[in-house]
Image (cartoon, grey):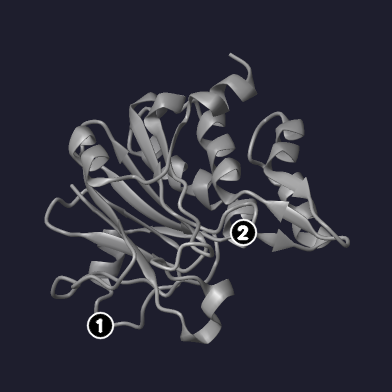
Amino acid sequence: MNILTKIDAIRWLPEVSNQITELLAFKFAFEQKEFHLPPNAPQLHQVHGTKVIDLIDILHASEQPLQKADGLFTTDPAKKIFVKTADCLPIVLIDNQQTHAMVIHAGWRGLTAGIIQNGLNIFKKNGIEMKTIFALMGPCISEKNFEIGPEVAHAFIEASFSKNTFDNYLTISKGKCGKWHASLQLAASLVFLDNEIPPEQIYADQRCTFADNNLNSFRREKDKRGNNYTWAEL
């Protein structure tokens, strides 16, 4: 199966709805408003980086300042994990036995620097086969509305999304007046496919945070914006 056929086989959806949630029987949600955090909910200081940490590390450092990371991994069914986004790509990763779960905040910096691969490597270290992983991508800024300069476009081309580096060119398109556009979801999809996650187990909520006024967007609202929340629990 060539890369275009695999991409086409991904479940590109207008919205990852409650029906999809029930079908998969996983406890997760992409919230466009602040949800009520459980008491002592584990939180991260998100920095657009590549670090993914284990929930245990946060619990052991509960009296310390928030840890700088953009992904959180858990095997604890008693805890809900979450990340905040406002145009960046939120991701939920969970195995089909519902014993290991992860949430990731993937901005273009973290995405091109390898945060998804770092997260998948944690699953591998825990003995989880990639063919058992479900990858769920939440709403983010669309390629049409994600205008970037040539330096960011170059970062997408040089990233390690796929062993076939030519595939990286699928993630960007030429814009106007020296600008480019990039697809965060397509870039993430290349990483999932390169790790042999079956395309039918990859879901993409195609709502655009910039275009949908029901979602929070940094590019649209700047400092006045709120956050979108993505959470998961086992």
Q: Is residue 180 above or below residue 229?
A: above
Q: Position of residue 33 (x, y in %)?
A: 31, 70
Q: Position of residue 55 (x, y in %)?
A: 28, 60
Q: Residue furthest right?
A: 177
Q: Residue furthest bottom?
A: 224
Task: Residue at 17%, 52% (x, y): give it.
Answer: 76
Of residue 202 and residue 45, the one placed in the foreground of this image is 202
Q: Is residue 143 above or below residue 211?
A: above
Secondary structure type for disc 2: helix
Nearest to N terminus: mark 2 or mark 1: 1
Q: Position of residue 209 (x, y in %)?
A: 48, 62
Q: Quadrant of residue 157?
A: top right
**Disc 2 residue type?**
Trp
Q: CA distance from mark 2 to mark 1?
A: 31 Å
Task: Answer left or right for 100 relative to 207.
Answer: left
Task: Residue at 56%, 61% (x, y): give it.
Answer: 107
Q: Quadrant of residue 194?
A: top right
Q: Is residue 131 above or below residue 143?
A: above
Of residue 42 and residue 107, the one placed in the foreground of this image is 107
- In the picture of the structure, the residue carrying the numbered disc 2 is 108
- In the picture of the structure, the residue carrying the numbered disc 1 is 63
Report if the CB atoms under discs 2 and 1 are less than 8 Å apart: no
Q: Is residue 144 above or below residue 20?
A: below
Quadrant that contains the N terminus: top right
